[in-house]
Amino acid sequence: MSGQITSNVFRGSGVIAATAGGLNWVSTVVTGSTLTAEAGNGYWINTTSNTCTITLPSSAEAGDQIIFIDYARTWGTYKIIIDSNGLNYQGEADTYTVEYDTDGETLNIVYADATQGWIPLNDDDVTDAPVQPLTQKAIFGYGTTGVPSSIGGRVSITNLVNSSGVVATDVTGVGTTRYGIFAAGYGVDKAIFAYGYTGSSVSLSNLVNNSGVVAADVTGVGTARYYPGAATYGGDKAIFGYGTTGSNVSMTNLVSNSGVVATDVTGVGTARSELTAAGYGTDKAIFGYGYAGSVTAITNLVANTGVVSADVSGVGSARYAVAATGYGSTGQAMFGYGNTGSPSSLTNLVSNTGVVSADVSGVGSARFGLSAAFYGGDKAIFAYGSTSGASVSTLSNLVNNSGVVASDVSGVGTARFLLGGAGYSISA
């Protein structure tokens, strides 16, 4: 046999074996910090001197394949970052972070369809999966400037919080003024306020885009109520649960990753109001505390599918009008402050497996009816609330990534309580 056979894998005379998947191996070793990859190619990626960001094709067909190999076994020092260029990767949107950082790793990906996008055939490290980007900013909104019976004290103003935890001045609100409202993040970088009390209970919602701009009222879905809890779950969705219509309920309403509120789901656990909720474990949530004819400390875990579990006997002091938030880089959460019969500054940390710890003596002014949110990638902030009777505050307390609450910071904006707060934006 004459001539050169470059696809002859076995290099044996007279034996021709096509390269797997018809791939073309690019002979030039990639040493730069960026690479625009093409389907049907294999690449040697040398990260001896720098991280390499690899941009995948902006369009693909089922069966398109690309292979990347750690040429110098240095991905553990300088990783590769995959930019899926608008297409999904392992079923997650392009906003998720995809990194590979194992020495000697081989990444072999094939495009499936618009739903799953690119899927690794192998990556030599099954723990490497898309990681949800971290929330950088927060928003507080709505509430009342007086005691709950003071309907005239309702507001719809909002206050943005930057990635350093600094609270901004009032922004004239959009939508119906109300209190007893809660908020949660959804869609990775957006937020939603929903439900509340305007003189009667409502099921209105207001979406917040990733710039912190609040949209006009959307006629709600589900039973009108106020004092529910709300949290992010499943990485990019939200759940509102419990609350009161005049009578306590235990129903929930799931929110899709596009901000659409679903119909009522019959709740599990004790009907109650003035509870709170937070995300934990990166994709799950927990409801806790509240008022059910008397103050409670019960909690209910929420699976990453939005299914609420039965009551768990609570840990710590029973109280209501508590705030809760996620914090930390591995999915912890905390409950803070609330009313035990008088305002408190107690906190209870929640592990990334949903286990609630005992009371921690709080820092800062005791208060209730405040709100809390995640910010800065791994930190949190408690803000506003009532310190006693009709006294409302603009105080805030920052929480570091170890769950330690800092002392009071004189707040900015209109003093109020019974408001909502949530994280938004993945851009600092």
Image: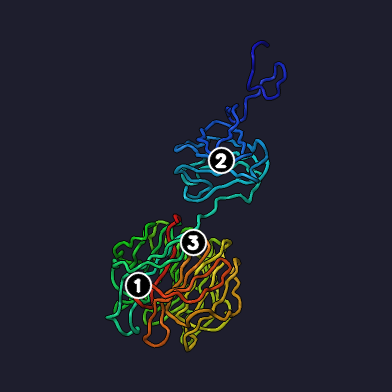
Which residue carries the number 3 mark?
376
First in sequence: mark 1 vs mark 2? 2
**Image height of 96 relative to 53, above or below:** below
Q: CA distance from mark 3 to mark 1?
A: 21 Å
* Residue beneath the point at 30% across and 77% down: 154
In terms of depth relative to the viewer, which is nearer, 69 or 108? 69
Which residue carries the number 2 mark?
52
In screen coordinates, is 8 left or right of 93? right
Checking the image for residue 413, the label placed there is 1
Badge 3: residue crowd in 10 Å (few <14, some 14–19, many ≥20)? many
Residue that extends furthest to the top in the rendered view of this protein: 2
Query: In terms of image quadrants, where is residue 47?
Result: top right
- Residue 22 visible somewhere in the drawing: no
Asked whether the residues under the numbered discs 3 and 2 touch, taking CB atoms below 8 Å apart as contact, a structural biologist would say no
Query: In terms of image quadrants, where is residue 396?
Result: bottom left
**Image height of 65 relative to 319, above or below:** above
In screen coordinates, is 344 left or right of 190? right
